[in-house]
Image (cartoon, coloured by chain):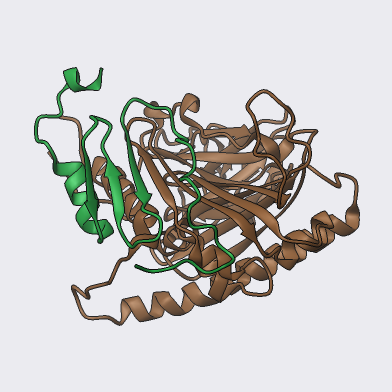
Amino acid sequence: MRTASASVRADLPAPHRMLRGERVYRVVWKLHTDVLVGYCWCGESQEAEDPIELWTWLLDHPDTHEEGDRS
Amino acid sequence: MTQPTPPWPMNQWYVAAYSSDIEAELFGRTICGEPLVFYRTVEGEVVALADRCVHRRFPLSKSQLVDDQVICGYHGFTYDRTGTCVAAPGQKRIPRSARVPSWPVAEQDSLVWVWIGDPERADTDRLPRAPWLDHADYTTVRGMESLAAGYELLVDNLLDLSHETYLHGGHIGTPEVAETPITTEVDEDAHIVYVSRHMDDAACPPFYARSTGIEGRITRWQDIEYHPPCLYLLHSRIAPVGTPDPVEGRPDDQAFRVEVVYAITPETERSTHDFWMVARDFALEDTEVSRFLAESNRTVVLQDVEALDVLQVVVESEKENYQELSINIDTGGLAARRMLKRQREAGALVEA
C-alpha cells in the first residue's frame, strides 16, 4: 500500500457532496490507494484504477436509466 | 439531418470582453471564428455586429462610429445598431440585402457575453454567474492573454491543477497540490463539472502568503466549478491550519477567499482568448496586494500560455490516433472533454 507523505493527511474524508442536482455522477479517489470509486446518481457504484474505464462504466450502466430511476 | 460537427459548442454564450473594454468606440475581436465589432451606444447598450462591410468586406472595426452608427472607413456604407444599412454612397434606394448580421449580447458580472449560434435561441437565463467580479465585498484584478492553442488545451490545463506543482512552483504550486486526491462531480442536467481538492495541511505558496500575510502552514481548498464551454470558477479558501471548517449560515471570517475566474473563449480553431480574473474578499483597498496578485497571476497565466503554445505545435504534428495516458488526476478533465464533445455534437444537429 502506498503511504501518503507526512505533509498530507491522507485519512481526510473526501469533501462533502458539492453539487445538489438530481443526476450527479461522483468519483472519489480512495485514500491511500490509486483506486477511484464512481457513484452513479442511480445509487450504483464501481471501483476502477483507470478514470476512462470508470467513466465508461458510469455512463453505460445500466442501460435502463429511465425517468423513473431519478426518484 | 446533420451538418459537420463544429469545432466549438454552438448555441452558447461566450465572454467577448470585459465591460470596461467596450466604450463608445469600435472594438474588433474574433469570437469562435466570427470577426465581430463591438461598441457601446449612447444609452449604454453593447452592440455586436459582423466586422465586415457587406460591400467590399472592409473591417468595420477600422471605421468610424458616429451617433451610434458605424460608417465604413472605405466607402461610407452606414449601419445602425441592428446592422441595417441606412446610407450608401450615391444611392437613392439602399439594396435590401445591405445589412450585416448582429449578434445577441448580454452584460453581467462585469463581463460582455456574446451568443454564438442561432440568435433566436439566445437565452440570458443560461448565462453562468460570477457575481464576485463586481461585488462590493470583493476586489478584482484581471487581464487577458492570447493563447496560440485550441481552447480544449486550456480546459485540460485548468481542470487538473496538479500541474501547479510543476509548472507554477514558487508561485501557486506546492508539493501538496499534486499529492492530494481529488473528488469529481458531474451534473448532467446543469452541465457542471466540479473538482474538489482539499488540502488539510499544506505549505502556503507565495501567491497567498504575500497577499494574506499568513506565515505558517495552511488549509487550502481548491473547488473548481466549470460551466462548459466558457466559464471556469476556482473557489479558493485559504486559512491557517487549525481554523475550523466553515459552517453554512455562519461567518467564516478566519479564512481568506479568492475566486479565480477564467473565461475560455475560442478565437479560431488554434487560438484562444484567455481571460483571467482574481477576486478576493480581504485587503480590499490595498493597492499593493492588488498589484502583487495581478502581476503574480499574469506570470502564472503566461507560464500556461508558453506551455500550451508548445503543446499545440506538438499535438498538430502528431500522427493520427496518438494514444494518451490518463490517470486519476485527469478524472475531471475527462468529464469536461466529454461534456464539450456532447455540446459540439448538439451543434451539428439541424432541426428538420
Q: Nearer the viewer, residue B228 or B236?
A: B236
Q: Quadrant of residue B175?
A: bottom right
On the image, the x and y values in percent for residue B220 come to: 63, 53
Residue drawn at 54 percent across, 46 percent down = B223
Vertical comparison of B132 with A34: above or below: above
Could you tell me if residue B215 is visible in this image? yes
Q: Nearer the viewer, residue B188 or B343?
A: B188
* Picture quarter with the C terminus of chain B: top left
Left/right placement of residue B275 relative to residue A39 reads right
Vertical comparison of B64 with A25: above or below: below
- Total number of numbered labels? 0
On the image, the x and y values in percent for residue B224 come to: 51, 48
* Picture quarter with the N terminus of chain B: top left
Vertical comparison of A49 with A43: above or below: below
On the image, the x and y values in percent for residue B229 come to: 42, 46
Could you tell me if residue B4 is visible in this image? no
Q: Nearer the viewer, residue B24 or B319?
A: B319
On the image, the x and y values in percent for residue A64 come to: 9, 30
Residue drawn at 36 percent across, 53 percent down = A30
Left/right placement of residue B212 relative to residue B266 reads right
Residue drawn at 39 percent across, 37 percent down = B97
Chain coloured brown in the rendered structure: B
Chain coloured green in the rendered structure: A
